[in-house]
Amino acid sequence: MKSVHRTVPLLTLLTSLSLSGCLGSDDGGGSATSSGQLNYNGFSGLSFSTASQSGTTGADGEFRYYPGETVSFRVGDLVLADNVPARRHVTLLELFPGIRSALQTPTVDAEGLRTHTGTELNLLENASLMNMTRLLMLLDWTQGVPEGEGIEIRQRVIDQLNAALPLLDSPIDFNVPTTEFTATGTTPSPANQLLARICFHPEGDELCEPPPTPEQIQNAPERPENEADWDPETEYRQDLQAKRDRILEAIRTMDEIDNEDARTYLRRELKDITTAVSNRYYLDEDVASHPASDTGIKSVRVKRIGGPIELSAIEAISTRPEDVTIHAWSWQSAEVDYFVSGSSGGESELVMSFRPENTYRWIRKSLRVIIR
């Protein structure tokens, strides 16, 4: 049944929501395992498990699952999230049940069409999400995330993390206020205690040694003023102080990555995933040309590369309704109907926003209609 209104009736919307379930997967059904990806630009070193699959994410952040399963993620023994609906693309936002639920409610943009991007950006202000993202970015071996790379958590880091977790004053809790999660000083937060026990250099590197204590430095001899009198076998006070400074400066702390760094990273990942999902869909024509005398109903259809098209919702506007008028749209047939209402030389852009089945993301495609 086709809607003849620009806004979807409540009953139709509720029906589409119920048909799409939790909207948590970009994949259809089937008996074969599917390949999912955590974030877009790579996220390696996380342990994942579903009811049937388990392993470690590789360079692309990939994991395996059967449609309908949930997935859990860990960094070594540190639990990140359990029972996350498995899908083609998973972001850090979806590791939190409250955020995951809120993602299902789209916003409306300046054109009057529904979109998920505003919802995503609003949810980036969540403190728990910021805490987790910042810590994961700091566990990245090369800290290349600001340069556009993915996150690489090496086994050396995981081994040290596992050894450090039982020594913390209290467990890592992503749900505490950010000021508490990032606290330094005489009572550093568990997150900072963890980072202080991880060396991000090869095993045996001087920077991985315990720093000389103030007592050791104080008890060491002063370096002679005459270089000819220096003993190469002696560690002088100045040498120990310089070594202590190098080691302490190599220790990562939570304040090295702030909330804006985390938001920039997440915005990049969300944008790239939306682009990847959007690239799987296209219209059966990009430009349509009709004579002014042909006022019959025309249709444009959404199609999907490599599979059947299944939508949960669709809506459309005409940027110049005096030239081209929207007649109806149908999420069941993935079509938008329109007719020419202007004179020769006019034109309009038909902007369609649609949500593929089993995802919260809304995709935007346009058709240029020329009246000749």
Image (cartoon, rainbow, N blue to C red):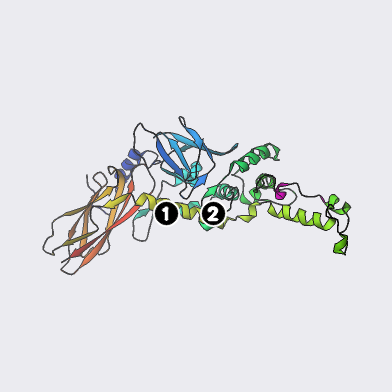
Residue 372 falls in image quadrant: bottom left
Residue occupying the point 13% across, 59% down: 295
Magenta segment includes 212: yes
Going from the N terminus, do you reach mark 2 or mark 1 first?
A: 1
Question: Looking at the image, do the residues carrying marks 2 and 1 touch, with CB atoms under 8 Å apart?
Answer: no
Gap in angstroms between the C-alphas marked 2 and 1? 22 Å
- Residue under label 2, please give it: 145
Amino acid type, mark 2: Val
Magenta segment includes 229: no
Q: Can you tell which of label 2 and label 1 is closer to the viewer?
A: 2
In the image, is 302 to the left or to the right of 231? left
For label 2, the SS is helix
Q: Which mark is residue 117?
A: 1
Residue occupying the point 20% across, 68% down: 346
Instruction: Please identify the residue farthest to the front as the structure is shown.
Output: 228
Q: Give neighbour class at mark 1: few <14, some 14-19, many 20+ (Cα, 10 Å).
A: many
Q: Which residues are magenta?
A: 202-213
Residue 343 image offset from top left, x and y in percent: 16, 68
**Residue 306 or 365: which is nearer the viewer?**
306
By secondary structure, the bulk of the magenta-drawn segment is best described as: loop
